[in-house]
Image (tube, grey):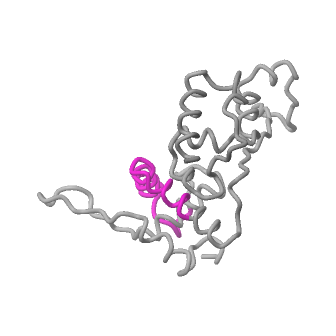
């Protein structure tokens, strides 16, 4: 297995404590875990990196169904979100990332079955799409206000704390008025 396809011992030491151990059922029934969490995580990361179907997972990893089943369980339990947040916190603590400004990739490519090249969408269709509305929010410096409203753990990071210059009214026309009122109350509470 190539080095880029496998978690290093150092990387696994960071991730392992975040993955809960499976407790066997008291009655002894159920499927016993055959593969280690590390082997499954390597398979999951390979699928996420390459974009192939679970069924096309190479034989050097656990089966696609095993990886998918554990991936689904980890998603449902919030394990993968906890991993992403822990990694973001670690990067921020080491000064390798600044989360005070967040962006989302706004690339819009229409995929046509059998087409040899991509087609640029019409301007009218893009302007009226949810994509533009999403980009207006996520490219906005008000992103931290929305994270505060959603009460995500990332919103507690120092670089995402709201400042006195953040005005929830700037989100008018992008989010509902009830959300703006909620953000205003949360912002005042956070600034105290």
Residue at image x 35%, y 63%? 20
Identify the residue shown where x is 70% and y is 40%: 166
From the viewer's side, name the closer residue of 182 and 68. Answer: 182
Q: Quadrant of residue 125?
A: top right
Residue 28: x and y in percent read 15, 60
Q: Residue at x 55, y 47 (%)?
A: 192
> Does residue 92 show up magenta in the picture?
no
Residue 94 appears at what percent x and percent y? 65, 73
Left or right of 97? Residue 86 is left
Give whichever of 26, 117 is nearer the camera: 26
Question: How many marks are shown on the rendered structure?
Answer: 0
- Magenta residues? 58-86
- Report the residue at 53% width, 52% height from top: 54
Which of the 4 quarters of the picture holds residue 140? top right
Point out the residue furthest to the bottom here: 9
Residue 148: image x %, image y %? 56, 43
Magenta-colored stretch includes residue 68: yes
| Residue 175 x %, y % | 64, 26
Q: Name the dominant secondary structure of the magenta segment.
A: helix
Quadrant in which the N terminus is drawn: bottom right
- Farthest residue, direction left: 27
């Amino acid at each position: 297995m190539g080095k880029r396809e496998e978690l290093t011992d150092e990387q696994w030491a960071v991730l392992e404590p975040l993955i809960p151990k499976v407790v066997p059922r008291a009655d002894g029934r159920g499927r016993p875990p055959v593969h280690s969490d590390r082997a499954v995580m390597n398979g999951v990361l390979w699928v996420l990196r390459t974009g192939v179907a679970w069924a096309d997972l190479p034989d050097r990893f656990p089966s696609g169904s095993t990886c998918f089943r554990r991936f689904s369980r980890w998603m449902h339990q919030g394990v993968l979100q906890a991993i992403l947040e822990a990694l973001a916190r670690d990067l921020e603590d080491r000064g390798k990332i600044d989360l005070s400004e967040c962006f989302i990739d706004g690339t819009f490519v229409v995929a046509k079955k059998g087409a040899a090249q991509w087609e640029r969408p019409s301007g009218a269709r893009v302007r009226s799409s949810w994509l533009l509305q999403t980009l207006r929010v996520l490219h906005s410096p008000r992103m931290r206000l929305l994270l505060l409203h959603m009460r995500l753990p990332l919103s507690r990071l120092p670089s995402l704390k709201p400042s006195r210059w953040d005005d929830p009214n700037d989100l008018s026309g992008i989010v509902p008025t009830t959300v703006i009122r909620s953000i205003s109350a949360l912002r005042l509470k956070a600034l105290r």
